[in-house]
Amino acid sequence: MTTLRPFTCDDMFRFNFVNLDPLTETYGLTFYLQYMAHWPEYFQLTEAPGGEIMGYIMGKAEGHGTNWHGHVTALSVAPDYRRLGLAAKLMSGLEEISEKKQAYFVDLFVRVSNTVAINMYKNLGYIIYRTVLEYYSGSPDEDAYDMRKSLSRDVDKLSVVPLTHPVRPEDIE
């Protein structure tokens, strides 16, 4: 049976297998620790019966006023555990936490080339809100989609009215 539980400091030594995917952003240890300290409820993992980490989600709550929202910083599932609904389960948990915090929406950034993830997010109810030019560093840099899903507090769905023009990373609130 798969277990959904909070990410702990000990997990930092066990989750590298999940991060081996080239589309997964990998951060420094202090970055992960900062998320565990500030937004522990948004940092969850799925664990196999034998204790292997199957996937994780890391996020936060941010913004002000009608821009108050949940943000998915990272979502990754190990290759052996894909297509089992784990990503959807992790996303649902983050959305529930954001609802409890009375957020207006949940957002995330995804590489425009990551069509598998984009389609998964669309199936979960997310829309492409805007394109962020050269968001991901590389050779060459790659654009990102800012995808959003409105929550119950956004009765008029104003947070998911797509922008018609791309933005640069420095223009993101």
Image: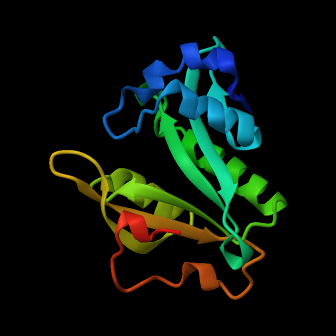
Residue 13: percent from left, percent from top: 56, 13
Question: Which scheme is used to colour this image of the protein?
Answer: rainbow
Q: Quadrant of the N terminus?
A: top right
146 vs 49: above or below: below
Query: For the view shown, which residue lies furthest in the left direction?
Result: 139
Please tell me in which quadrant of the rendered image residue 67 appears.
bottom right
Q: Is residue 62 left or right of residue 131?
A: right
Out of 52 and 16, give the one closest to the viewer: 16
Quarter of the rendering containing residue 32: top right
In the rendered image, the vertical position of residue 101 relative to residue 128, given as above or below? above
Say whether residue 21 is visible.
yes
Measuring 69% from the left and 88% from the top, which residue is drawn there? 156
Q: Residue at x 70, y 44 (%)?
A: 42
Q: Which residue is rendered at x = 37% and y = 26% of the image?
A: 20
Residue sitting at the far right: 100
Q: How many marks?
A: 0
* 20 lies left or right of 27: left
Where residue 8 appears, as percent x and y from the top left, is 70, 23
Q: Position of residue 116 (x, y in %)?
A: 36, 52
Give above or below for 103 relative to 49: below
The residue at 73%/76% (across/down) is 65
Picture coordinates of residue 40 (x, y %)? 74, 37
Residue 85 is at least partly visible in this image:
no
In depth, the one of 90 and 59 nearer the eye is 59
